[in-house]
Image: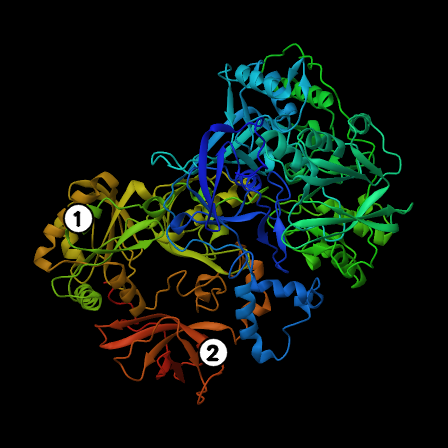
Amino acid sequence: MTDYRLRQGGRIDRSKSLSFTFDGQRYAGYAGDTLASALLANGVHFVGRSFKYHRPRGIVAAGAEEPNALIQLGHGARTEPNLRATQIELFDGLRAESQNRWPSLSFDVGALNNALSKFFPAGFYYKTFMWPAALWMKYEYVIRHAAGLGKSPTERDPDTYDKTNAHCDVLIVGAGPSGLAAALAAAKTGARVILCDEQAEMGGSLLNRHAEIGGKTGADWVADSLKALAQYPNLRLLPRTTAFAYWDHNFISLCEKVTDHLADKPKHLPRQRLWKVRAKQVVLATGALERPLVFQDNDRPGIMLAGAAQTYLNRYAVKPGNRGIVFTNNDGGYEAAIDLADAGVAITVLDSRDMPEGANYHAAKTAGLDIRAGKVIVGTKGSKRVEKALIADLGSGGDRALGQVEELDVDFIASSGGWNPTVHLFCQSKGKLEWRDDIASFVPGEPMQKAQASVGAANGAFGLKDALAEGFAAGAKLAAASGLGKAAKPTKAPDAPNGNHLPLQPLWLVPSTEPLGRKGKHFTDFQNDVTAADLKLALREGYRSVEHVKRYTTTGMATDQGKIGNVNALGIVADVQGKTIPEVGVTTFRPPYTPTTFGIFMGRDADDLLDPARTTPMHSWHQRAGAQFEDVGQWKRAWYYPKDGEDLHAAVNREVAAVRRSLGVLDASTLGKIDIQGPDAAEFLNRIYTNAWKKLDIGKARYGLMLKEDGMVMDDGVTTRIGENRFLMTTTSGNAPQVMAHLEDYLQTEWTDLKVYLTSVTEQWATISVAGPNARKLMAELTSDIGLSPNALPFMGYTEGTVAGVPARVFRISFTGELSFEINVPASYGLAVWQAVMTAGEKYDITPYGTEAMHVLRAEKGYIIVGQETDGSVNPHDLGMDWVVAKNKEFVGKRSLTRADMSKPNRKQLVGILTDDPKTVLPEGSQIVEELLDKPPMTMVGHVTSSYWSPNLGHSIALAMVKGGLAKKGKKIYVPLLDGRVVSATITDTVFFDPEGERLRA
């Protein structure tokens, strides 16, 4: 290590030396370091290149607000881009690389952009790459390759992630002085408390500065407080845990980094864990973020925040340099200057105020620091690290530099432009901000979610004594307000100095000796390379809303959401517009507070656990029979049953022919089944379906079509009246949950007067559908108490009895166009009855058939499948199903359906297609044209929705949606294929087999 590491002090463990690499170079650090502190200890400031101009960039901050030091961490499957070096805990063997450079960090070809920067101002992409249009694809290729920073892993993520839910009375976000105080006060009431903090060590700013609380050092007070909190069984401590989102009703999302800091990650532990916390009360003790001063070329490596310099010195025992400047407009900057000087660093303090005040100023003056009042930095010099600072007098108006420019040799600059309370979570909770002139920043105002409080620096209370007092008061008050905490005697805050970060002189833009934008850049957003000149350009372009300025310049739109730059940008915009910052307004803070891995949202819901795999009671039989399965929603359905030597097509042809010839059996248990009961059940169905239901007789079934509010088909199915006030609705297999939610939505929000009760019974019943000319003969062998004649049990009839000795419901419903019986038995009897059906059906050469054969059979009859013939833009008229739409009643979607546009003759309509070559099976999704040209483009008039080979017809068949198709039957059409062939075909009726329906009514 270099002489930048102090020989003593800090909170690092010097007994544990760690080795790591950065851009292939090996370095050493200690346990307790972050990657940023370890790099600084080794004299490395230059860690990356800026996004647009590829300018050299260094470490600016010490926490989540870091905009520059974005790192590619790890390699192979565990590589991860855009991690902040300031938040990466050092471990042995850590491997890190810089980003956004080629071929190397020190020599980056992209740096040419900086030389050409005048051609890349804000919004340049709105005005370039427009001509010639034919070159856009080449432009896009170059732009896409230039975009982005790091590289996503190409291999499968080897880590696991967890999700967990938690409820508490009080959630405290932030474990600095006010957060710890709130936890101490809340925990002793007996309330359930969760205290989370994004850092590895709790304590916040008390670990970074010299402070006294109750006669103890700040660090000792933190240790004692944590020891006391550990004794409470009702309190949970969550270090390394970021509260990244604040939703409605005090629902907070937390990301806990469980093993990211470990070199050897235990296999039984997840990498990260998502906490979904519902809290009765929330304390936001999120602290404050220092903002930089915006001076010319303020982005060179070695230029950082004063608070960050103080943190690296006191917490990590690292000097940011040997000779530097602390440039400040407030009294707080002196605190960092004094600490740096005490560590042997040569410090010059530049204070933009003519007459500095405050205890810290006087302490610095007493310590003999070189303090220059009324001075500002008007420029810097240096290539890969700052080498010189150019200083001059600040004019009385703060808008120009005066006098002779002086050059000072430096190897770092620390600036302090004031502090912004960290209000991100408060804003996410829809709270309103208020502006405070005394600190020149926004603070939490009126919360929308009343069961919360902001305390300490997050509330603008920068003094330590005030922060502690607010924390203790809020902890006790909110614990009592939760209803479970016992009222406790208010805890008196221990004695602590308030300090003084005031008075502050707002200075949003430090003037230079050159006009703005010439010979240098004043950066407000480091990560997106947004300058003060860009902001003024946006205003000259006519943008007035701060949200529009934000989008035009991209200020505040990087991964850091402008944590340290937004208020400076608002100040510059306000000055140009002649307004106050509150009049300009604020931009929106959105979740997540810091970038969050997708892994925690998946948790263990991957691979086989991604979605529940639902199986029918007969699934084991299908497996033994060699069935191939397909996923239908969450269900595993038998797709086809291949025999030796059969492929999909051969097996399906055999199954389809068997059903038409003799007898087939299908496992239809996956159909959605909803039990509908109540005195208003018939009225409810009458409103939900497009056709009439009030007069349906008991023991009868009816086909129904369900629409969305926009008049488009949502689902279809058969519903049976099994009692005066009881119906059984069936839905498509994959759409059952959506239908159930749709029905409940209307019952609970629109038709609250109806007495109707819904129960999903899909898994309570096994459904066995037997179809074919011999179906009635088979049923006669399985039941003795059910009348099976056409008169006793007609088509669309229902009855109850026993089948194979098991109580059953039997329906005369057909999706194949054949004589069919659907047998419903309790799920626990499903396999036994199925086996009985197979045994009894052997003499009829019974053939199990899967979903693919079912599709062919229904297509032969022209039956639709919702989601295949429909796509959310298809209404009943388009399907030729006006017969199922009642004209004298109201139903969901009727108002939309009656619009003239919904019945225009040129809408796409369902038709049949027969190819001229009977053996050609059209690919589903193929586009249809009426006029065939030599080459594209051609006018498309429709597309194929379903297409199969029909062994019963000896011809391919297809269903299609064609513009004005119902009036074009018999007309020739053409289907160009991807392989260059063109298939000619004829538009026909949708029913290809048994058009009179004699077989299903047999």
Q: Amino acid at mark 1?
A: Trp
Judged from this view, the residue extending furthest toward the right is 396
Instruction: Please name the residue shown 84% across and 55% down the image.
Output: 513
Q: Which residue is mark 1?
A: 621
Q: Which residue is mark 2?
A: 941
Q: Position of residue 876 (x, y in %)?
A: 47, 64
Tag 1: Cα neighbours inside 10 Å, few (<14), some, or many (≥20)? some
Q: Position of residue 46 (x, y in %)?
A: 59, 49
Residue 9 in the figure: left or right of residue 454? left
Res 619 visible:
yes
Q: Earlier in the sequence, mark 1 or mark 2?
A: 1
Q: Amino acid at mark 2?
A: Val
Q: Tell me the element at label 2.
A: strand
Tag 2: Cα neighbours inside 10 Å, few (<14), some, or many (≥20)? some
Q: Quadrant of residue 821?
A: bottom left
Q: CA distance from mark 1 to mark 2?
A: 45 Å
Q: In the image shown, does 545 or 830 lie closer to the viewer?
A: 545
Where, quadrant-wise, is the C terminus in this rendering? Answer: bottom left
Judged from this view, the residue extending furthest toward the left is 843
